[in-house]
Amino acid sequence: MHTHDRVLPHLKSGNAGGNDGKTIEGCQNDDKSVLEMDVPQVSLKLIFRGQEQPSLDSIEFLAGPDKYKADAPQDRDLTKAVAVVLLLFRAHSTWPELTLFRIRAAKPGSFVDTILNAKKQSQNKSPICALANGAFLRLFLKPRPITSRYLDIDQERLKPTAVKVVLDGRAIDDPKIISQITTLIAARKNWDLGDYTIDVLPEPRDPGSSVFQLQAISPRKAEPVERSTFSDAPGSPTFLANRHVERNLCPYKGLFAFWEQDADVFFGRESLIHLLTEKLDQKHIVQVSGPSGSGKSSLVAAGLIPA
């Protein structure tokens, strides 16, 4: 996935028009509800459960003094789709003030399509669709033309810093862990993050400036560029390249388990691996037990199976 810059006029999310048809398409909001008109800024809390296989458990929607909560059905594609999009959005919290955050899908059957299809179904009884009387789903803006395969986040009502991530009761701010959660959830639906592009428009440092640069990046990887203004920010080419190296070379996986592909960097359990292989030579079933988080899955997946 290559990275490129293009000069664009100032665009506001939710009211973006085309630039003579040569730059980017616009995006339209749904009909405005009373809640949206009265409360321009909202915040979200995404509550996840499970370190090895994280899943979105519930969403809290805060709009002024009003608080709404919806349980997220684990068997629904929409649950996984909104989790992936909002986690990618949250990863841009260290960027300068954004005026555009757009995710483009290269193929049908994407998490972008899943969210856009849910927005079309006015009678959908999903708790996510009904959250805050439908105001939650209206944070995801429909493309123009409607046949386009992209969506925007409503920047006027939601900022990356207003998305809080909680995993098993612990607040998560580390971009690397957020990226790991994103990848694990996407992988469960075989959504390849390399098939998506993120377009962002940072707010300029000079308030009088009317020229902006669109930076197109892949959520998974990007080729190095000669110069990047925000090289250390999550989502930037440098950050993505470093993250790719860390995923493949770093022996420390944070909260997540080692799997078969991590066998080359899995150390310190040689005696247990040897013991398990001996046990399996004697009988076909061996039970591995231990406290939660002690490394049972890693021992079996990255140690025993490769051995």
Image (cartoon, rainbow, N blue to C red):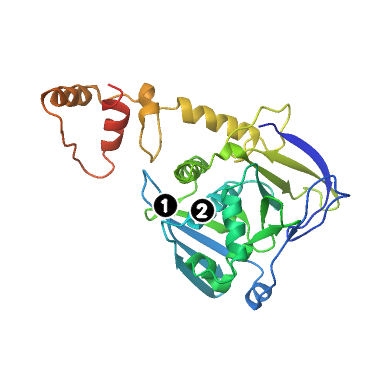
Residue toward you, 53 or 39 = 53
Q: Secondary structure at mark 1?
A: strand
Where 32 sits versus 142, above or below? Answer: below
| Quarter location, residue 269 | top left
What amino acid is labelled 2 in the image? Ala
Residue drawn at point x = 36 percent, y = 49 percent: 50
Locate residue 249, reporting x and y percent.
46, 25
Q: Residues within 10 Å of mark 2 (few under 14, many from 20)?
A: many
- 277 vs 262, left or right, is left
Residue 46 can be seen, yes or no:
yes
Q: Earlier in the sequence, mark 2 or mark 1?
A: 1
Residue drawn at point x = 53 percent, y = 43 percent: 191
Locate residue 200, reporting x and y percent.
70, 46
> Residue at label 1?
55
Q: Residue furthest left?
A: 282
In the picture, the quarter occupied by the N terminus is top right
- 288 vs 122, left or right, is left
Locate residue 299, reporting x and y percent.
27, 31
Residue 154 can be seen, yes or no:
no
> Residue at label 2?
83
Where 198 sits versus 300, above or below? Answer: below
Residue toward you, 172 or 88 = 88
Q: Real-space Cα distance between discs 2 and 1?
A: 8 Å
Where 61 sits versus 144, above or below? Answer: below
Q: Are marks 2 and 1 in contact (CB under 8 Å)?
A: yes
Locate residue 26, reporting x and y percent.
77, 55
| Quarter location, residue 17 | bottom right
What amino acid is labelled 1 in the image? Ser
